[in-house]
Amino acid sequence: MTTAPLKTDVTFTGPIERAAAAAERAEARGADGFLVNELKHDAFLQLAVAAGGTRRIELATGVAIAFARSPMTVATAAWDVQRLSGGRAVVGLGSQVKPHITRRHSMPWTQPAARMREFTQALRAVWHSWQTGGRLAFRGDFYTHTLMTPMFDPGPLPSGPPPVWLAAVGPRMTAVAGEVADGLICHPLTSPEYLRRVSLPAVHAARESAGRAALPFDVAGTVLAATGRTEEEYAAALTATRERIAFYASTPAYLPVLELHGWGELHRELHRLSLRGRWQEMGRLVDDSVLDAFALHGEPRAVGRAVRERFGGLYTRVGVSFSHDADDTLALDVLDAVKQ
């Protein structure tokens, strides 16, 4: 998709009290972006913490859970991060899967691709009102925003609103990203084959259809990596990475990726085992061919070179994700090799 040099992103998953220091280290080591996932902490709050001690690095949610919120709540939080960072925010949104939205967040789940399209449009409508002073008059099938009084209007930003990336795996949500967003966030359980044959064609077609083909568009990916500084660390990383692939592969949302490689039956067996909580047994079903399709492994610099070779020209920016406990300097060592 691109011949430009790969940008590198550090993905942070630690406790919020370490976010600022981690962002500062990433910036000092030359990373282009600092991404936070919404696991145990609010994604926007983590970025607000990280904004204070950094000056250059982009600050992205990778992802924040859209359907756990309304477009207005996302608009407000993202606007604050954009203000605090001087225009370095990136809003990465994901739908999550139905059980988490309905049972963990107690929010509605219907037509996720159509809902995400409208969510993004509503988000931009709110920002447009704030930036221009124009009337807020968004009416859709899922969201309606028609009231904005001066007391609740934070006013325009010198940088304007942040870009929006959408996380997607299936072709419908991927097409929505191409149609209404500024970037696509690819799941770690993604192979170059799936990108070439499914994700990127869906993006291209949607952007052409929407008349947005000439606008900038990022394809951001996080690559599963098994590495370490000792043989013991490396062996533990391999085991943990197999188990993580098994966890992802057991989820019905990622079945299309498995089926592209002819591993649909593996998904069905892993799903059966996941319902019984047999996680370690699941990892043992991930053989070397599956491991090699979805993860890179070896010493840190070799992994970094392999990231560039495998995903250069497909991703515009890339990070690495470890399935084992590792300090963030290990990720920075890998990303150094991506750039060199």
Image (cartoon, rainbow, N blue to C red):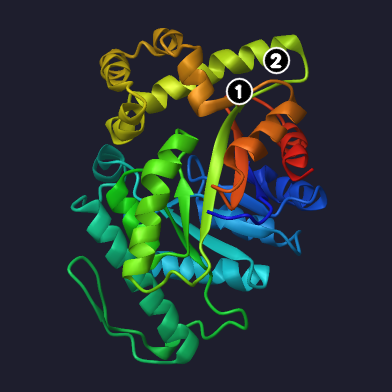
Q: Amino acid at mark 2?
A: Glu
Q: Which residue is mark 1?
A: 324
Disc 1 secondary structure class: loop
User: Quick check: can you spot residue 292?
Assistant: yes
Which three-letter amino acid code belongs to the residue tagged 1? Answer: His
Q: CB atoms at circles 1 and 2 under 8 Å apart? A: yes
Q: Residue at x 19, y 53 (%)?
A: 111
Relative horizontal placement of residue 225, taking residue 327 as reference (left or right): left
Relative to residue 92, is residue 97 depicted above or below?
A: above
Q: Nearer the viewer, residue 140 or 302?
A: 302
Chain-order first, disc 1 or disc 2: 2
**x and y percentages locating residue 54 in the rendered image:** 75, 60
Residue at horizontal 41 percent and vertical 10 percent from the top: 285
- Near mark 2 (Cα within 10 A), the count class, few <14, some 14-19 or many ≥20, is some
> Could you give the CA–CA distance between mark 1 and mark 2, rounded to whole angstroms?
9 Å
Give the numbered dot on residue 1.
none
- Which residue is tagged 2? 233
